[in-house]
Image (cartoon, coloured by chain):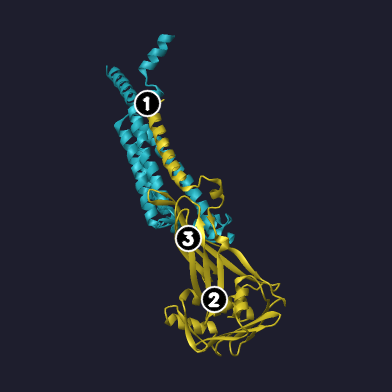
Amino acid sequence: MNAGKLVAQIAVVAIIVYCSYSAVISAIPMNNEDMKNPITGLDTLSIGTSLDGANLKVTVDGEITSNLPQDVVDTKFALFVGKGASKIALFELNLGNLVSKQATSLAKTISIPICTLLAYSCSGVDDTGKLTIPVSTQIAFKYFEWQQSYLVDLDITVNNKQMPIETTVGAPSFSIDKATNTAEMTVEVASGGSTILESVLDSLTAGSYEFTCGDATFTADITKGSNIGLSLTAAGTADKTAMAILQEFMDAHEGKLTVTYGGNPYEIDSTNAAAFVEMLSELYKRAGATA
Amino acid sequence: MRDDTIRREESKLSGEEKKYLNSKARVVKRVVISIVEYIAIFILMMVIATYMEYGSLDKFVDSLGNIGAWLSPGGMIFNALVGFLPIIALSCIGVYFGEGTVGKMVFGIIKCVAIIIWLLLVFQGASHSLALPEVFSSMGLENLTVGMDGLVKFMCMVFATCILIPIGEFAGARKKHKRALDHKLRLDDDKDF
């Protein structure tokens, strides 16, 4: 038995327990109610969508309250349509610091190119004709301060959610014209749905939406009756698909894409442009293009 | 009978006393154990690496072909094991010293400091974060980044306080070391005559 070693070991354990305890006590709510609802107000956020030229404006408004005893630092919350490399941000909230016991107001507007969003509707068609679109959520935050550093520092992206959309006529129909490299998808979607894509379709008036870039055109024809009819057409030239033309344009413009819509040019940033091209190739593939 | 026992105790160092004395045999024993441990850790890491790469262990034998890549500088095994080598070497040399010697205390302190330096270097190289292997993507987890700054700082604090242990051990075993050393010197003197 070594008394000196024993005393030292007790001292070490005491120091570690003290440091852990003091960090925990200042970061974990001691009140049961706060413990159960660390952040309140998320369900009262209002999310509105409106059209702005070739873009869809998503507006998030409201405030959330942190009931945690410490500030939550560098908080970020983002929602994407799609997953992996081909996802596009529906909204990205950089909340900064959620100050302890205080309401943080959120007001954020982001613009998404409609053509990218619409192109997604061809990606999630399953064999039974149901449209399901993958949705990814990203949450990032730092918490649990200890000596000016954060013991919890996470950045998580989850894509296990699906956004189901009711289609009323069963499977969508696809067609392809290989002579002109034109791929088409037609589907009917029930109106008044609650998902984001459905509300986008609800807010678009009937008509033809044409986006062009060089020789490539992407057209969304929307008809409104008891159901919403959606017809997507991507057209290239005799020897090139629409994706090939867009890709050439993006390669020459640092990954960015400029589409003409209603006579005006709209720039699409590189992330959304890449997602758009990905979705167009999905449309061609489903329509039966071989290469 | 009783005299016999006493005489045997006097003429030989007890196991308890050997603990307080420097010993080369102990180093050899420790080196052998370390090599066995090293191989066990190596195999375990191969199993984990295979699992991360393929999501199952079916291809364990195939993945052994990748050893070259993992062992080369910058490879996973190279970083983890070779990075740890100085600490293993230090602890092997450290066992030469008996309890209560200044050498044992100094080596105990150096060991803690070495672990702290190792932690700082390894996580600096990994840009302060651990990223998720591919296998989790099937569970819908696309990306998970864990910032290691705070955790590394906390671990450094833990090992910094652990420096107290060799100091305490030295304080507690100092007298026993002296007694054992005296006994050994006496026995050595007896042998000379």
| Viewer-side label of 3, 1 | 3
Mark 3 Cα-neighbour bin, 10 Å: few <14, some 14–19, many ≥20:
some
Q: Does residue B96 appear anywhere in the picture?
A: no
Q: Nearer the viewer, residue A291 or A111?
A: A111
Label 3 sits on residue = A104
Describe the element under mark 3 as helix, strand or loop.
Answer: strand
In which quarter of the view is residue A232 placed? bottom right
| Chain ID for cyan | B
| Viewer-side label of 3, 2 | 3
Describe the element under mark 2 as helix, strand or loop.
Answer: helix
Compared to residue A91, the image places residue A75 above or below, namely above
Describe the element under mark 1 as helix, strand or loop.
Answer: helix
Query: Which quadrant is the N terminus of chain B positioned in?
Result: top left
Q: Same chain for labels 3 and 1? Say yes or no.
A: no
Label 1 sits on residue = B18
Mark 1 Cα-neighbour bin, 10 Å: few <14, some 14–19, many ≥20:
some
What amino acid is labelled 2 in the image? Answer: Glu
Between the C-alphas of marks 3 and 1, the distance is 67 Å
Label 2 sits on residue = A278
Between the C-alphas of marks 3 and 2, the distance is 37 Å
Q: Which chain letter goes with mark 1? A: B
The residue located at (46%, 44%) in the rendering is: A25
N-terminal of the pair, mark 3 or mark 2, is 3
Q: Same chain for labels 2 and 1? Say yes or no.
A: no
The residue located at (59%, 76%) in the rendering is: A200
The residue located at (44%, 80%) in the rendering is: A251
| Viewer-side label of 2, 1 | 2
Compared to residue B55, the image places residue B96 above or below, namely above
